[in-house]
Image (cartoon, grey):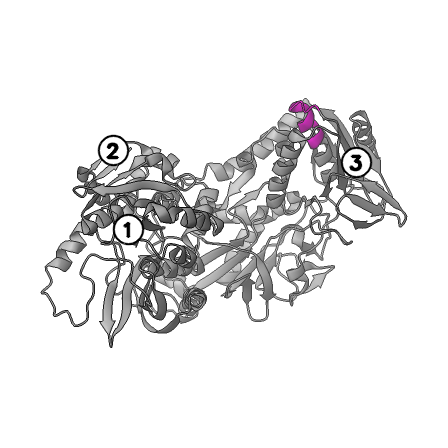
Amino acid sequence: MNNETPKVREIVLVGAGHSHILFLRKWGMQPLPGVQVTLISPAPKTAYTGMLPGYIAGHYTKDQISVDLVKLCRFAQANFVIGSVDKLSAANRLVNVKGRTTISYDVLSIDVGVTSCPNFPVAKTAPVASVKPFESFTNSWESLKTKLLKSRSTVKIIIVGGGVGAVEIALAINHSVQKQKINNKIQLQIMDRSSILKGVSETTRGKLLRILKQQEIQVKQDVQINEITLDTILFNKENSMKFDFVIFCAGAMPYKWLQKSDLSLIDGFIQVDRTLCSLSHPEVFAVGDCAHLSFSPRPKSGVFAVRQAPILYSNIKAKLMKKRLQVYKPQKYHLKLISLGSKRALLDYTSLSLVGETFWKFKDLIDRNFMNKFSRLPIMGKTRTPNLSRLRSLDENYTPQVMCGGCGAKVESQVLLEVLNNIEKIEARGLVTGIGDDAAVICFNNQIQIVTTDNLRIFNSDLWRVAKISAIHALGDIWAMGGKPKFVTVNVIVPDAISKIKKGWLTQIMHSAHTVFKKEGAVIIGGHTSLGAEFNIGFTITASVDRRPVLISGAKPGDHIIITKPIGTGTILAGEMQHLADGDWVANALNWMEKSQKKASEILSQANAMTDVTGFGLAGHLMRICESSKLGAAIDLKKIPVLDGAEFLSGKGIKSSIFLENSKIKERMAFVASPKADLLFDPQTSGGLLATLPEEDLRKVLPELSRKGFCSSIIGRLHIGEPFIKVI
């Protein structure tokens, strides 16, 4: 990720509500040079609330109601942190993301919506789901739908809450059950602590109640729930009711971390003025349901969040440029289009209350047009050269610095080996291994040590996560040899920025690396930082080994070949850079990349040969084992684990940067060309351990790997012969 324009200001967006996703789209088309934008959201996608009932009813797929935040942030050139905020200090301008260090900001905007969590005791393992946040509810609905399909008896579902949303969910579930022709009977009941549907006109309320009655959906009003056990709701002190599943649609509760913040709040919601700024901290904006419009209170509705987006975009830019802010004027009335399960809707606006298919089509058109804004992002031209006077208007103390040369791209395997082999031979002096192994094994004062170094160019906008993966990537050579990391030095290149921002970047990198190495028993003892064209993070690690180091030259004929992680990271990352990789694929790949292999190394401690699969791809690293051990290999392409989406992208022609160089090895291979076969040459970031073991060790090793969450497939076998790989 190239950072041509020096960064002098930071915007942090907490939450991926309607206002924020519209802000990011607008920012991608008209950014403010020199400003770094960071989005923090707990999932790679966010659901559009207006289409949720249609999704439950079966009119839309999950992808059709989801905005891919990975693609959106790539388009907007914004950093994306997949995580949940658990603390905010507005006084110090710091946001804390669970499990990591704080993130600083110059301007903060909060658009996290609300939750619908109960205010009464609920058994931990009770089958209960909350509609908000919507992203987690979509997963709960899929589980419930599976249960409905499998059940042969009556399933009783209770929906807690009496607003329009609760009615839409009930009607949608009922339609879904009828549409899928589920044979078992379903009982739906809406419970509310007062009268339901108080937010609509009496005419609309009457129509909705009649529709619920026609569809045999029961309504129970004036219910005070006291407790929910594993299968029973206790209410009105002495009454109870059995259930199979409970869905919370009640009320709008603020998040606990907001309630504990130092912002000015009312009932846990952020008080804002007419410019959407916090009453207590003017550098903080709040929009959507988490905000309280102190000048003109309004009900919680996504309609207001959409209308607030242009004002938010203009005012954040104005705040940074020290210009006058615009005033937000909320509409007094707004149109409600209420889904009725089937492709019919009810239009509610002032005195109007109309039902029909026409209104569903109208709602469907509005919703699809909104989603098209994010599925069809505009193609933007090249970034212009930064205007230094504009940067100085953002920070008058900014002075551009001369960039140092060089960037950390991987060099092809053959080129690297040729250069290393041409270096004048040095006296051994305790060197145990030669050029070609994963790391250097040396003997010093009769003690065996392992020394390795590795570095990565930035491949994701989340610096904390990149640093974590870079550290785990560097540890791969140590784990492959069965070593125990002890000491680490760091080499970091960062782009030009003001000191405050550079300090923030380095804090993210170093704290993340520290958490990784501390967990592995190693300590960071020093390092070096410098300026460059883009981020580059590298580590040199010294490790001890209290047993025979596992080398790539120790493989034996008949050994089985095992890999501990799926392949395809290079293709996924290349696809993400081209806006083609699904956000869920990217998130899954990152999760695998940041998975420590310490346990896998211990399980595979008796392997005859082992390496970690990284830049040269699976085929390249397997060939190194074959060459060093003077053996041939046969592998089964069907048995090789692949990351979600990697084969699809490969079939679309997506290739990582050094794919062509890696694929030169195919002259020493036999295989049938296919998208999956191409992944054999895909360079891996923090890839799995590739180990060879005798057959007698498999019975113990494979179950252990599986229990620890690693891949445990046997992908092939070694045999006597010339170094050659046959793919079947």
Please tell me whether mark 1 or mark 2 is closer to you in this view: 2
Q: Which mark is residue 615?
A: 1
Residue 29 visible to the viewer: no
In the image, 515 versus 106, the foreground residue is: 515
What amino acid type is highlighted by mark number 2?
Phe
Region in magenta: 172-183
Measured in 3D between alpha carbons, the distance from the residue under mark 3 to the one under mark 2, in whole angstroms, is 59 Å
What amino acid type is highlighted by mark number 3?
Gln
Q: Which mark is residue 550?
A: none
Task: In the rendered view, tell whether residue 264 sits above or below residue 24.
Answer: below
Task: In the rendered view, tell whether residue 640 sits above or below residue 601.
Answer: above
Comes first in the chain, label 3 or label 2: 3
Secondary element at tag 2: loop
Tag count? 3
What amino acid type is highlighted by mark number 1?
Gly
Q: Residue at x 53, y 47 (%)?
A: 21
Measured in 3D between alpha carbons, the distance from the residue under mark 1 to the one under mark 3, in whole angstroms, is 57 Å
Q: Please give left or right for residue 555 compared with residue 222 in the image.
A: left
Q: Which mark is residue 671?
A: 2
Screen quadrant of the C terminus: top left
Task: In the rendered view, tell whether residue 303 sits above or below residue 226.
Answer: above
| Residue 52, quarter of picture | top right
Secondary element at tag 3: strand
Q: Are marks 1 and 3 in contact (CB under 8 Å)?
A: no
